[in-house]
Image (spheres, rainbow, N blue to C red):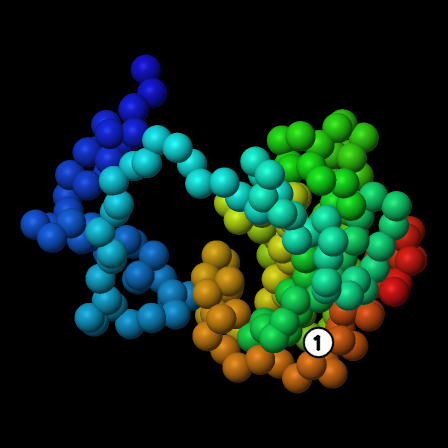
Amino acid sequence: MPLSPEEFYAHATRDADPDGHLPLPSMTGWDTFPFERGGLRTVPLARPVTIEPLRHGEGGRECPACAPIRPTVWSDPNWRLSALGPSGAPLVLLLESRDHVDLPDLPDDLAAELGRLTVHTARAIESLPHIARAHVSRWGDGSAHLHVFFFARPKGFSQLRGTCLAVWDDLLPPVPRSQRDADAAAVAQALATSYGGTPT
């Protein structure tokens, strides 16, 4: 039997201090964690709310992704890829479906395309000589329109490995826009060559 929201809350907060602060997680000891442990503490876990907040593009709310203002670096009839910035990571790309669908709603043909396109995009990013890895993330709590993030981890910076790269991206000073744009153009061209579509 799954835990109810209240049972999950009670379970999750059983080790909290009297003010509701949970113990620091093991990740604060990782060499990739971007903060010192001293003085760091968690915020109290809020009680559950049974009705989830509406996301953009849901329940009559406007969907910014359906009328995007970001210029794309690559596109095809079903997908578009944009460079985000400013970013501390050398390159952060956003892949979005053209249709207003979310990940669980993708028809099988688009799901298959997403799988292939994700692999080709990661290959294109990792083909850049100064990039070690392409990290791929989908959270989906802000928008009901499918969007997948690609974070390029720079070569030689093992401290930026793993899930904390998204946090480091906010902490590091922005890379020069000209370098970001050159990297995005190179990825778009590699993607067009290996997968198809058009660099824009």
- Seen in the picture, residue 26 relative to 98 is either above or below; the reply is below
Name the residue furthest front.
60
Q: Residue at x 76, y 69 (%)?
A: 184
**What residue type is disc 1 on?**
Arg
58 vs 118, nearest the viewer: 58
Asked which secondary structure carries label 1, the reply is helix
The answer to which of 59 and 78 lies nearer the viewer is: 59
Q: Most extreme residue toward the left, as rendered?
A: 18
Q: Position of residue 150 (x, y in %)?
A: 64, 58
Please provide percent x and percent y for residue 1.
32, 15
Judged left or right of residue 48, residue 102 is right
Between 14 and 82, the residue placed more toward the observer is 82
What x and y, as percent, mark residue 87? 59, 73
Point 51% across, 62% down: residue: 166
- Residue 148 lies left or right of residue 11; in this view the side is right
* Residue marked by disc 1: 180
Residue 6 in percent (x, y) is at 24, 29
